[in-house]
Amino acid sequence: MPPALARPKTLGHAGHGQETPHDDYLGGAVTSAAAHTQRDRPARIPEVDALRGFALMGIFLVNAMMMAGPYGLGAITDPGASALDRTVEGVVQTFAVGKFYLMFSFLFGYSFTLQLTSAERAGRSAVPRLLRRSLGLLVLGVLHAVLLYTGDILTTYAVLGLVLIAARNCTPGAALRAARILYGCLSAFLLLLGWGTLLMSDAETAEADAELAEGLPGLVAGYRRDALSVVRANIGQLPDQLLASLLMSGFVMAAFLVGLHCGKRRLLADTGSHRAQMRRICVLGAAVGLPGSLFMALAVSGPLGPRWSLFAEMVGTVTAPALTAAYICGMLLLITTARGARIAALFAPAGRMALTNYLSQSLVMALVFTAYGLALYDRLSPAVVILGALALYAVQLALSSRLMDRHRYGPVEWLLRTITLARFPHDHDRSAVSGQRSHHDVRREQLKADTQFNGHVSTFDAGMVCGSTRPTSEPRPAPLSHCATQPAADLAAVRRDRSATRPADVRQPDRLTGAVGSPGLRCGSPIPLPRTESAYGGVGEHGGGDGTCRNRAP
């Protein structure tokens, strides 16, 4: 990922999460038991969850194509492919291949810093926890590769996570410099390697493809025969996958380090301060990444031919981080809009249980394409595979939302956290009082009621200007009823009066979280947080910062 994403100066940190008692809210909807539950919960950065859910979709589209047959994404030319098949493969090559695993890797590095904060707040050494976590990822990854899908990423994360542990005390600047050096060296090597393949004649290229194609009938038969033959076929492909992982690991490590840099600076904790720079990254990332990806698609799945395929793949791999950075910044900018906030709220639950969703995707695909189930390997067109993958992901989005409304962890996340903590974690997401409505539902209803304009300025609680969707840290000068029927024409006057009388750096503790800022909204973010989650971080995987929010004019 290009380091431009990491250039802004250090911000006021957001979200180390003071653990303070919370007052009653909405007429006593939060009981003392529920408030105790809130203090025990780690908060989350909703942008991280939304980005992770978005990345999960892109990864699934690529993995589904790879699991559907031996010609996945043009690795070997399919002589029977139709024009529609080529087009679908080209679209996936252009917009998905090599981009979303880097986004996932960036988020892995970012969340690593928040896990360090979690261990520090708990008064425990982070290293034993992180080592156990890497061991858990390694075991899950090996089982995943042998039983379900050889293109597993968890083993790579487990091994490279050890490098992150060793580099945990490095400065943000050192992490960024290391990422630049690693990216530059690996890019130069891959481009030279790809350039060398252009020296091969067309006859030599065709002969190499023919050798690769000789083993395909046996591979297809292995995935269709029985369950034991599926395992044998997976094991037989592991050496090739190991080589691919070695080539890919350099970019994964660079993304880890960029994420480490951004996490140490808490750049995702207040994205509103960097809109201009994120727009520039979107434009530059697309300008660099899209041509490289299009060139790769035209060579691998298009008319350029096999002679150009390896060189084009190297170009696409080297330019993919730029498009990944554009995706990240574009998504963060989209989140700042009302429609984007709704999209982010759709992706976020799936991102919270990304590991469960990732493994369940492989399980379903294995049941569809191998002898574990329907044995449709090499029998479905790319268009059908992509439509099926999108349908399955839509189901995952719905199931994730329901599950995260009731639980703190997904099933595999719970297992991995048990390994990480060396004890059973507690699920505090259930209602603290039997029969009480979910705090998520209470918060949603309050926010829905607050945003009903109907020709008047809407009602918001302390720290919000009447009718404004942006949080402000000024004290509330009037009760809620003052805003309930205030005509919109008076809004400008209200804002001018408040701006004139507000001190330069007044911050009001939030009645819901005890932190500074507006209830249910994190500074610079329009995404409503669930009623039971602090807006300013905590001890969990995605919390962090110092619990402050810099003033901004309403």
Image: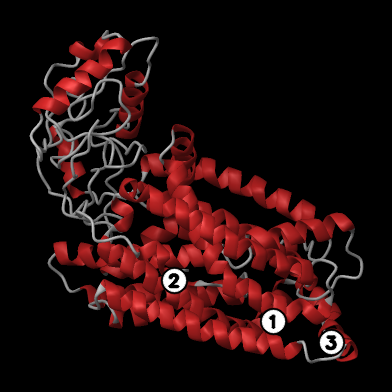
Q: Name the mark nearer the viewer: 1 or 3.
A: 3
Q: Which of marks 3 and 2 is nearer the N terminus?
A: 3
Residue 551's quadrant in the figure?
A: top left
Q: Assign a secondary structure to mark 2.
A: helix
Q: Residue at x 33, y 54 (%)?
A: 268
The one nearer the camera, 125 or 285, is 285
* Mark 2 surroundings within 10 Å by alpha-carbon count, few (fewer than 14), some (14 through 19), many (20 or more): many
Distance Cα–Cα, label 1 vs label 2: 33 Å
Q: Label 3: which residue?
A: 205
Q: Is residue 299 above or below residue 443?
A: below
Q: Which residue is drawn at 28% across and 37% down?
A: 521
Q: Which of marks 1 and 2 is nearer the N terminus?
A: 1
| Residue 73 x, y percent position in the rendering | 74, 67
Q: What residue type is labelled 1?
A: Arg
Distance Cα–Cα, label 1 vs label 3: 29 Å
Q: How is the image coloured?
A: secondary structure
Q: Assign a secondary structure to mark 3.
A: helix
* Residue 352 visible somewhere in the drawing: no
Q: Which amino acid does label 3 sit on?
A: Thr
* Mark 3 surroundings within 10 Å by alpha-carbon count, few (fewer than 14), some (14 through 19), many (20 or more): some
| Residue 507 left/right relative to 94 | left
Q: Which amino acid does label 2 sit on?
A: Ala
* Mark 1 surroundings within 10 Å by alpha-carbon count, few (fewer than 14), some (14 through 19), many (20 or more): some
Disc assigned to residue 232:
1
Q: Label 2: which residue?
A: 255
Q: Assign a secondary structure to mark 1.
A: helix
| Residue 518 x, y percent position in the rendering | 22, 34
